[in-house]
Amino acid sequence: MDTLVACKFRFALAVIAVFLVWPSVNFAQVASSFSGDAIAAKGKVGTQSFDMDHLTLPSTGGTLDLFDDVPKTIPGGCLNCFDGGVTILSTSGNALSSLGGADISGITVTVGGHTIRANSFSNTTFASCPVSLGDPADASWSGYVGYVAIDDSYSSTSDFPGGISDSQTFPLGIDGIDGTVSVNQKFSSSETAAGADIVLNGLQIDMKSGDQIVVASTHAGITCPKAPAGGGGGCKGKVTGGGIFMLNGKAQTFGFIAGTKKDGTSFGNFNYVDHGTGAHLQGNVQSVSMDALTSTATVTGTLKTGGGYTLVVVDNGEPGRADTFNLTSGLVTTGGPIALDPRGGNIQIHKGCKK
């Protein structure tokens, strides 16, 4: 065997050996780290600073929950001072997504000579990595405030009957001379291939004096794996949703994210609150199936309290008011498809992994 042939032979053996020992790569990896917060109330009034019922998600993920039915004193007023008032907070991070949730009964506060009353906060933020590495991550939210009253000049009962589910800002004093009151204020949001992060404040009072009060604040963040050279390839799809609808005359709020990774396993979180009974459902995602012809997604999972749930949603286009939500579980059953409330909500079946 001449020298040239021998070199080619040794090179071929080396290439074969590399392929034999090279590890297989699953591009649908789990998130690198998580972040999240759920806060009942925080702020600064004069020299007093406060931060009440605050959950912080570890970077390794997991689940944290808090239930508090004791009214709290805040500077200038009280939190959950209504009959039967409760605070429900939750944070979770697993697989490719993180969640922050806050449900607060209400607040009454007098600051800078203005009295603000608000109740029925329900706030959920989500952050999720793309299923196909290298695509942008997602940051989304759903928020609902049942009632807001500022002095005697504004009342959401007449201006927004039934509640507010979008972002609104109202002036304190003539032309906002004393400050502003914001509802469902997206404090920050970012979406890149490296991760996503979002902070939403259910109620934010900003005074020209520098005083600030924030109620029902949630944060969800996630750091995503880097895409390998040449791209990640492959995607099974994802469905997200959040909003409000009425059941038995009572508001129901929800938020969820569900998808299937390239390796066939599912990921996601589910959060639901019945504002009539106070039932709070949280669960993981175990399976996701989608019907492209009918724009229907079926999600199943296990609730933290035990037992399973089945969620069937239909994406009937934008802006979402014609989308439907159908939940079946041992605790809450909607009894069939229910259209989302015109005040807010949306179901989105993502085509591929990108928006």
Image: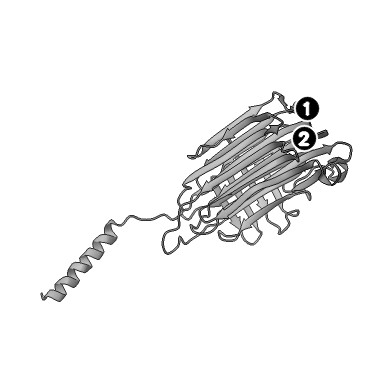
Residue 289 screen position, x and y as percent = 57, 53
In what quadrant of the picture does the C terminus appear?
A: bottom right
Query: Are the residues at dot 2 and dot 1 in contact (C-beta closer than 8 Å)?
Result: yes
Give me the disc on residue 351.
none
For the question of whether residue 332 can be seen, the reply is no
Residue 136 screen position, x and y as percent = 55, 57
Give the residue displayed 45% in from the left and 58% down from the top. 227
* Label 2 – label 1 distance at C-alpha: 9 Å
* Colouring style: one colour
In front of the other: 126 or 339: 126
Q: How many marks?
A: 2
Label 2: few (<14), some (14–19) or many (≥20) C-alpha neighbours in 10 Å: many
Disc on the earlier residue, 2 or 1: 1
Apparent side of residue 95 relative to residue 99 in the rendered image (left or right): left
Q: Which residue lies under the disc numbered 1?
A: 82
Give the residue displayed 47% in from the left and 62% down from the top. 233
In front of the other: 115 or 4: 115
Residue 218 screen position, x and y as percent = 64, 40
Apparent side of residue 4 relative to residue 269 in the rendered image (left or right): left
Three-letter amino acid code at the position of disc 1 = Phe
Q: Secondary structure at mark 1?
A: loop
Q: Which residue lies under the disc numbered 2?
A: 119
In what quadrant of the picture does the N terminus appear?
A: bottom left
Three-letter amino acid code at the position of disc 2 = Asn
